[in-house]
Image (cartoon, rainbow, N blue to C red):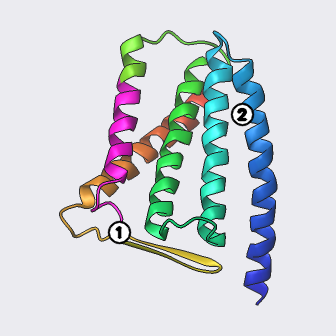
């Protein structure tokens, strides 16, 4: 009972944070004309707000979609949060010299992972038993390559973001 109360409070806080993130993303994206810092941080914040929305939709069952679909949306928004934050680190606090084809390559990789997320083998099963969510990925199946690609892409981008932010 205590866990359910605690997680309910956390979900309501999550709802407020989601609204603030949508507003913050709106403000940043409105100011982002020719400014890659505002654009990339705003997009990262937008996907963060979408990720929080997906979490709320999954727990409160306010859509007709299955938990597997919500899990896929969660992974999709998660990879794009980190993608845009990673690109943001190229420009903040000081712009670094980067080649356009490097940025295009990042978009291609993230888009490929986004497509893999929706293939049938990425998530076997998902369920919500409040306050817990289960995601079943079988690492021994032939299709687990998609999961491993997502995880490696996420981990590498997270480590590079941290390294870039600590370095500056």
Query: Residue 23 vs residue 113: left or right?
Result: right
Q: Nearer the viewer, residue 87 or 110?
A: 110
Task: Give the total of numbered labels.
Answer: 2
Q: Nearer the viewer, residue 166 or 1?
A: 1
Residue 146 highlighted magenta (yes or no): no
Helix, strand or loop at mark 1: loop
Answer with the quarter of the image where residue 46 lies. Answer: top right
Q: Residue furthest bottom?
A: 1
The residue drawn where x is 78% and y is 51% is 17
Q: Is residue 70 above or below residue 154?
A: below
Give the labeled residue for mark 2: 25
118 falls in the magenta region: yes
Determine if residue 168 is in view: no
Q: Residue 132: x percent and y percent?
A: 59, 78
Instruction: Locate residue 82, reporting x and y percent.
Output: 53, 40
Residue found at the far front of this picture: 64
Q: Position of residue 10 (x, y in %)?
A: 77, 67
Q: Quadrant of the C terminus?
A: top right
State the residue at coordinates (65%, 29%).
Answer: 41
Residue 133 higher or lower than 155, as above or below: below
Compared with 109, 118 (above or below) is below
Disc 2 and disc 1 in contact, CB within 8 angstroms = no
Lower position in the chain sequence, tag 2 or tag 1 = 2
The dominant secondary structure in magenta is helix
Residue under pointer 1: 137
- Residue 114: x and y, percent? 39, 44
Which quadrant is the N terminus positioned in? bottom right
Residue 40 seen from this side: yes
Q: CA distance from mark 2 to mark 1?
A: 32 Å
Q: Which residues are magenta?
A: 105-123
- At x 43%, y 41%, the residue is 156
Mark 2 against mark 1, which lies toward the viewer?
2
């Amino acid at each position: 009972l205590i866990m359910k109360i605690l997680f309910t409070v956390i979900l309501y806080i999550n709802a407020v944070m989601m609204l603030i993130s949508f507003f913050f993303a709106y403000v940043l994206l409105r100011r982002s004309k020719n400014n890659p810092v505002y654009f990339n941080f705003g997009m990262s914040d937008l996907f963060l707000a979408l990720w929080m929305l997906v979490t709320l939709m999954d727990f409160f069952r306010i859509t007709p979609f299955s938990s597997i679909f919500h899990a896929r949306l969660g992974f999709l928004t998660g990879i794009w949060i980190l993608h845009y934050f990673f690109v943001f680190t190229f420009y903040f606090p000081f712009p670094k010299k980067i080649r356009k084809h490097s940025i295009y390559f990042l978009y291609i990789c993230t888009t490929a992972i986004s497509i893999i997320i929706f293939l049938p083998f990425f998530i076997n099963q998902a369920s919500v038993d409040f306050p817990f969510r289960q995601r079943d990925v079988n690492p021994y199946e032939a299709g687990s390559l998609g999961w491993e690609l997502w995880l490696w892409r996420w981990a590498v981008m997270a480590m590079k973001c941290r390294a870039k932010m600590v370095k500056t």
